[in-house]
């Protein structure tokens, strides 16, 4: 998702969810609508407890170690995302969560996301495929490759914030 459409998405999703509540509420009634929202919440919590947050920690540690998260981590991670979407009240997020739980949709998402992964370890090498030299990128590339020697800032002793701690 491009960040230029993110504010519109953040604004329109709650409005679409409210419209969904109105449409479903008129079709099946208030109590059944509330029961469906609560059922989605309970299913999301059960699914999240079953998968646990451990899978997200495992993906994070693999990313820090320079290993690209593989397909074996995709299914539990997508289940965690689906469970979080089920916990959010609304029918559109529930529909997206149910779609994520369908294996062919999950595979399509993996094929789309896998192209965008570039895992770089601390030594500047890539974990998958040949070791590209990131300094040879196109001029309009958004990648900035800095070593610790390239950027280092000395503290300014004249700054009024120098030596201050939070709460002082």
Image: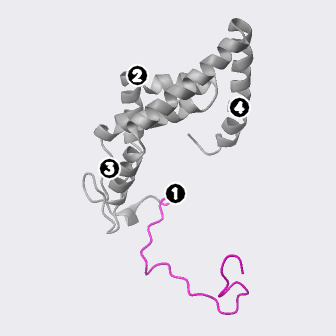
The span shown in magenta is 139-168
Q: Is residue 100 magenta?
A: no
Q: Earlier in the sequence, mark 2 or mark 3?
A: 3
* Mark 4 burial class by Cα count in 10 Å: few <14, some 14-19, many 20+: some
Q: Are marks 1 and 2 in contact (CB under 8 Å)?
A: no
Structural distance between the alpha carbons of marks 4 and 3: 34 Å
Residue sticking out furthest to the left: 130
Q: Which residue is disc 4 drawn over?
A: 14
Image point (55%, 83%), residue name: 153
Q: Which residue is disc 3 drawn over?
A: 68
Q: Which residue is disc 1 drawn over?
A: 140
Q: Earlier in the sequence, mark 4 or mark 2?
A: 4
Image point (39%, 51%), residue name: 57
Q: Main secondary structure of the magenta part?
A: loop
Q: Earlier in the sequence, mark 1 or mark 2?
A: 2
Residue 89: % across, % down: 63, 29
Which of the two discs, 4 and 3, sits closer to the camera?
A: 4
Q: Considering the image in quadrants, where does the N terminus appear?
A: top right
Structural distance between the alpha carbons of marks 2 and 3: 23 Å
Q: Which residue is disc 2 drawn over?
A: 102
């Amino acid at each position: 998702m491009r960040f230029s459409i993110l504010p519109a998405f953040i604004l329109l999703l709650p409005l679409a969810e409210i419209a969904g509540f109105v449409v479903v509420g008129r079709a099946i009634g208030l109590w059944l609508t509330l029961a469906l929202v609560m059922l989605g919440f309970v299913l999301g919590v059960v699914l999240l407890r079953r998968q646990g947050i451990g899978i997200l920690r495992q993906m994070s540690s693999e990313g820090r170690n320079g290993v690209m998260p593989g397909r074996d981590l995709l299914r539990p991670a997508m289940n965690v995302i689906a469970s979080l979407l089920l916990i959010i009240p609304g029918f559109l997020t529930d529909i997206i969560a149910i779609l994520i739980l369908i294996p062919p949709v999950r595979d399509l998402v993996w094929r789309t996301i896998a192209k965008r992964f570039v895992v770089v370890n601390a030594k500047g090498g890539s974990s998958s495929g040949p070791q590209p030299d990131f300094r040879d990128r196109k001029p309009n590339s958004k990648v900035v490759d800095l070593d610790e020697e390239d950027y280092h800032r000395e503290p300014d002793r004249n700054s009024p914030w120098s030596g201050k701690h939070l709460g002082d």
